[in-house]
Amino acid sequence: MIIIDNIGNLKECKVWLNESPLEKFEVSNTLSSLVKHSHSVTRNNQSIAVELFVAPRYYAFLGVEYIYKKTKDIEIIVNVAKKEGRIITDSLALPSDNVNLGISDEYAQTILNTSLKVCKNLSNIPSGVLIFNVGAHSDYGSNQVIFSKVTSILMRLFDNDQSKIEITELKSIIQNELNKPLTDI
């Protein structure tokens, strides 16, 4: 886990590269879409997870796993959790806010739409499968806006080769995204 500090007033972020911060949740259904591109970039399988808290109470936890396939497209899949997820006690959310394991149906479409929008503007997206399979949301602090923002951060981190990314570059990507208005990706 990498703790990203000094990213702005009342903003906290944790990043996991190629490690699983939460156990997998029980999936009730999936959303998916295919993005075609003209070139096939080869990349090793990888995973990224980001936990984000932006005051006064915005909270999101989202992770993605990439699996290489030799094709000319990338399939984006969002796993949606069953309604009742386990409560997570160790999180960046406010202590008064319950954090539930899983990607809720409420945020799944936002995650898919944002990833498709950002993906079309990135240059190094490899072919294969991108699965949003780690997540948590809070009862009061989570909403579509913060899940759109954390998805945008994940996609921009995914656009970089994790084996070569420096902490300063990681921090810069996150800061650039957080400095945009919350509704801007």
Image (cartoon, helix red, strand yellow):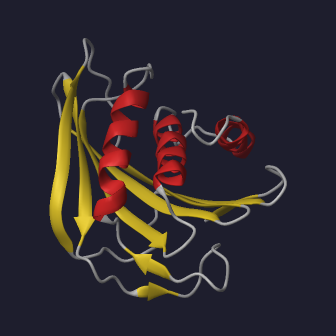
Quadrant containing the N terminus is: bottom right
**In the displayed structure image, the side of residue 131 where residue 2 appears, left or right:** right
Is residue 144 among the parts visible in the rendering?
yes
Q: Position of residue 130 (x, y in %)?
A: 29, 44
Looking at this rendering, what residue extends furthest in the top direction? 38
Q: Position of residue 157 (x, y in %)?
A: 53, 40
Taking the spot 58% from the left edge, 37% from the top edge, the residue there is: 164
Please say if 78 is above or below 135: above
Residue 184 quadrant: top right
Taking the spot 37% from the left edge, 56% from the top edge, the residue there is: 107
Front residue of this view, candidates 50 and 87: 87
Please say if 95 is above or below 60: below
Front residue of this view, candidates 64 and 109: 109
Is residue 21 among the parts visible in the rendering?
no
Q: How many marks?
A: 0
Please say if 34 is above or below 150: above
Taking the spot 50% from the left edge, 63% from the top edge, the residue there is: 61
Quadrant containing the C terminus is: top right
Q: Position of residue 168 (x, y in %)?
A: 75, 41
Taking the spot 26% from the left edge, 77% from the top edge, the residue there is: 83
**In the displayed structure image, the side of residue 84 where residue 87 appears, left or right:** right
Q: Position of residue 78 (x, y in %)?
A: 26, 53
